[in-house]
Image (tube, coloured by chain):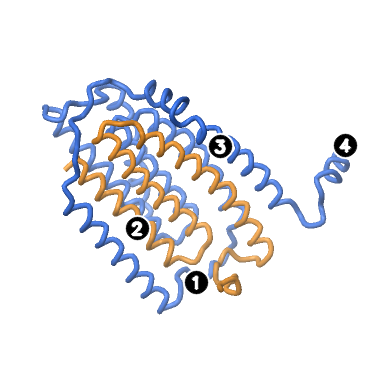
Chain colours: A blue, B orange
Amino acid sequence: MRHALRWIVMAGVWSALAGTAWGAEAPVPPAESSSTILEAIAFYAMAAVALLSGLAILVSRNLVRNVVCLLAALGAVAGLYFLLAANLLGAIQLIVYAGGTLVLITFGVMLTSRPGSDRQLVRGWERIAGGVVCVTLFIGLCMVLLCTEWATVAASAEPTTVAAVGRALLTDYLVPFELASVLLLVMLIGAAYLVRRDGESGAEDDADRC
Amino acid sequence: MANLHGYLLLGAMLFGLGLVGFLARRNLIVIFLSAELMLQGVVLNLVGFGRFHRDLDGQAFAGFILVIAAVEAGLGLALAVLLLRRKGTPDVEAWRALRG
């Protein structure tokens, strides 16, 4: 089990690196070319890593191992972004998500983990109800997306989309872009407010520190 | 299979796995990780549609979803630490009184 997880994580990291190299080398392969097979192989490999890591999150009982599996899944999905010619998004995923958010989650695990874990699964009937919901939703999703003829356009030829995405963010999506910064500020203040100790106000804390 | 259907199917699978974990596990942190996995499935759908429809809206929305996920991680972990400090266990069963 431990070795399998180690291999999954290694594969996730390597697939992310390979995806990065792929994105740098041949960002947007034409739809019908010799690189299609390579693209398919990369897709299958990263999809397998993402799904296996997701499954490992589901079954593993060790919290730290869960977090590391999420890291592998995020790396694999970042590689898929590179395959989809979303270079900027893949880089953001690796830097912000795998680098920042996951460290935050690791801190959360360290702060909240207690020796002697409790029961891991919900009660019997809740498990059955949850399983029915999940299976129904998944089958419905698959039926919809496999039975629909999605209109697709041939892949574009521009090597990278970073400049175009930046332009879109600062023109068409300027208001949500600014709102996102306000949201981040609100999150910082809210998180700092939530986790302060009871009966401790910011002013007194500052006075104590001085 | 590395076409739009493949990416949509993979997104649906990631979403399903996350949903199972979200509903079946009882540890707050694991529920949180499962929510992140569901978000990954959704973002993969968005980016896939953006790629195969050749427009940038998918990527722009995916970027905003990443911001939301970061905010969710910060606030969610603050809440988890707070709940843990009150009850001393990361088990959601300790908070059954919160159901309607």
SS state under label 3: helix
**Three-letter code for the amino acid on which mark 2 is drawn:** Leu
**Three-letter code for the amino acid on which mark 3 is drawn:** Leu
Image quadrant in which you'd find residue A162 = top left
Q: Which residue is mark 4?
A: A210
- CB of mark 3 within 8 Å of CB of mark 4? no
Q: Nearer the viewer, mark 3 or mark 4?
A: 3
Image quadrant in which you'd find residue B45 = top left
**Three-letter code for the amino acid on which mark 1 is drawn:** Arg
Q: Is residue A196 above or below residue A140?
A: above
Tell which subunit mark 1 falls on: A
Instruction: Where is residue B58? Give x, y as percent.
Output: 35, 37
Position of the C terminus of chain A, as image quadrant, is top right
**Three-letter code for the amino acid on which mark 4 is drawn:** Cys
User: What separation in Å lies between label 3 and label 4 (alpha carbons)?
Assistant: 35 Å
Q: Nearer the viewer, mark 1 or mark 2?
A: 2
User: What separation in Å lies between label 4 and label 1 (alpha carbons)?
Assistant: 45 Å
